[in-house]
Image (tube, rainbow, N blue to C red):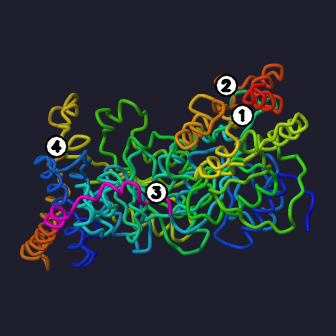
Amino acid sequence: MNNVFAKTQKARLLNFYRVMYRMRRFEEEVFEFYKKGMMPGLAHLYLGEEAIAAGVCAALNESDYIGSSHRGHGHLVARGARLDKMMAEILGKKDGYCKGKGGSMHIMAMDKGILGANGIVGGEIPIATGAAYAAKYRGTKQVAVSFFGDAASNEGTFHESVNMAAAWDLPVIYVIENNLYGISVDIRDVTNTENLADRAKAYGIPGVVVDGMDVIAVFEASAKAVKRARDGKGPTIIECKSYRWQGHHVGDPGEYRSRKDKNEKALWMERCPVKNYRARLLSRGDSIDEKDLLDIEASVEEEIKDAVRFASDSPYPDASEAFEDLFA
Amino acid sequence: MAKEILYRDAIREALDEEMERDENVLLLGEDVAYIGGNFKTSVGLYDKYGDLRVKDTPISEAGFLGMAVGMALTGLRPVVELMFSDFLLVAGDQAFNQMAKIRYMSGGQATVPMVVRMPIGAGRSSAAQHSQSMQAMAAHFPGAKVVLPSTAQEAKGLLKTAVRDDNPVLFFEHKMEYSNKFVIDDEVEPIPFGKANIVMEGRDVSIAATSSQVMKSVRAAEKLRSEGISCEVIDLRTLVPFDRESVIESVKKTGRLLVVDEAYEFCGVGAEIGMNVMKDVFYYLDAPIGRISTPNVPLPFSPALEFPILPSEEKILRAVLSLMGK
């Protein structure tokens, strides 16, 4: 048990659990909609990676910005986006965040500082970097976080953005969610860098590797990076070692991941960020007890139920709406 | 009052006046700051507005165009300069998948008020990767406005509008005009998008042109006048939005249409405009709609190869005569 964990207050500790549990249950319900054939298109689930967004976003202020990826539901939940409007969007409904025009991969919630989720791998990295430039330009002390996967760190936009952010001390944190695979391709087969965060050295900025299954470790690293950014000292790369429970998207069993080690997935699942954190909270042996956690779970279940009802009841947009919202 | 000015200085004046008017406007791109731009369109702005507002970027077109998208989403009005419109392809994802689509994908939550300025056009032996005219490709994608100023006055007025527009604008300057002198008003007001400019009125042939081709069309039309042929020259100004009504109105009067634009011919501006107005003008036409563009070969280096394939005053003149059955 590390220091921060011992010192952090009860409310914050419980909130980590609430946020991760919300993500977990949300994604499980999305998966249910898919299995029932009620979801158009696909979704890339965040199951297994909950500790990352929960830890990072806990270190942010409400006025900060995030840029998200195709696997973005967790980031939105962690920023406090409304589950009902998210679910409606994923089902292509009129009451969704984007009125059914974006879908799972492009949920945006400007009121939560979410600059959009992106279907192009690495596409949002320069955009979040630009938000950081704007914050510096205005002197607002806001920071921007860019979330993306291991594979995106091989895109040119990653290197171009980190280079500029480092050159100009921009208040941005690059969070690499290293779940080891870009669809079926093992990052270790296409990249000769054991820790992707080591790429920070090339740009003269800090690069930190953390256990992406440990929300406290992620929070600790993020808080440090956020402080550095807010103090005008520039960007940080945080690599979170993690794993996704599902394949690339719903409907992809992801069996390609057993070619090197057939137990790989099972071993990672033993390290479940949600379940293990729950056990860890109870093992503190002080003020947090089972009832606290059951209360959180019950209230999240209610919220999920409401979100599912809201999304199911919401009408589809009228076909004529395809021509709206193109220009301001 | 009027004054003489270089096209490049009209661009600089528009940038300067807009930056002075609105502190959210900033300029970024390769070589824009210290030397004032590769084509000298931002000379003096770095000294006046400082390093944070007039920013020399690394050679990372996707990176800095994407950064501008993030700036625009969070309330600034960045103006990005790409050194050549050919480099739009390097930043293609950020321009067309991000900048142009974010508002729509977000269901109208986001606004992306930004301008990407870039020079088009051949004629300097710059060969195949520094001579292209990317406007037809740009106009193919939904979500960004596409602007092609002809004269210095147009460049200044349209650039002001571009900076004030709440949407992404792809602004194509013709590199062969930068060093040309024009007479412009002392005070140039913003010129609205989507309203074509009838530069010359005429009865026999409508010539719908963009950018530098407007000036070539006017020169051709002046020569044709002495042969008794009266041309109506339409400066399209913007391809997105396209002022189809003005073109249709003109063709109904003249019965003939020639489209002149420097982008590649296949799936080009002439193809689109001809087809776009066809059903409204078909029964008024006295000749098939004509087009002058760049044929579908990469722009060659040698002037001996380059000039013959470009649109020219001579080609416009011959095309008009052909439409007149002469």
Q: Which residue is mark 1?
A: B130
Left or right side of B105 for B178: right
- Looking at the image, is mark 1 or mark 2 nearer the viewer? 2
Q: Badge 1: how crowded within 10 Å, few (<14), some, or many (20+)?
A: some
Tag 2, which chain? B
Q: Secondary structure at mark 2?
A: loop
Q: Position of residue A56 (x, y in %)?
A: 35, 63
Q: Which residue is mark 3?
A: A326
Q: Position of residue B296 (x, y in %)?
A: 64, 24
Can I make out residue B308 in this image? Answer: yes
Q: Give the Cα distance between marks 4 and 2.
A: 60 Å
In the image, is residue B217 above or below residue A4?
above
Residue at 33%, 51% (x, y): give it: A105
Q: Badge 3: how crowded within 10 Å, few (<14), some, or many (20+)?
A: many
> Which stretch is magenta?
A307-328
Q: Are marks 1 and 3 on the same chain?
A: no
Q: Position of residue A107 (x, y in %)?
A: 34, 58
Left or right side of B40 for B69: left
Q: Give the Cα distance between marks 4 and 1.
A: 54 Å
Q: Give the Cα distance between marks 1 and 2.
A: 16 Å
In the rendered structure, which disc, 4 or 3, sits on the residue that comes first in sequence? Answer: 4
Is there CB contact under 8 Å for labels 3 and 2?
Answer: no
Can I make out residue B64 in this image? Answer: no
Magenta run includes residue A181: no
Q: Which residue is mark 2?
A: B295
Residue at 83%, 47% (x, y): give it: B178
Amino acid type indicated by mark 1? His
Is there CB contact under 8 Å for labels 4 and 1?
Answer: no
Amino acid type indicated by mark 3? Leu
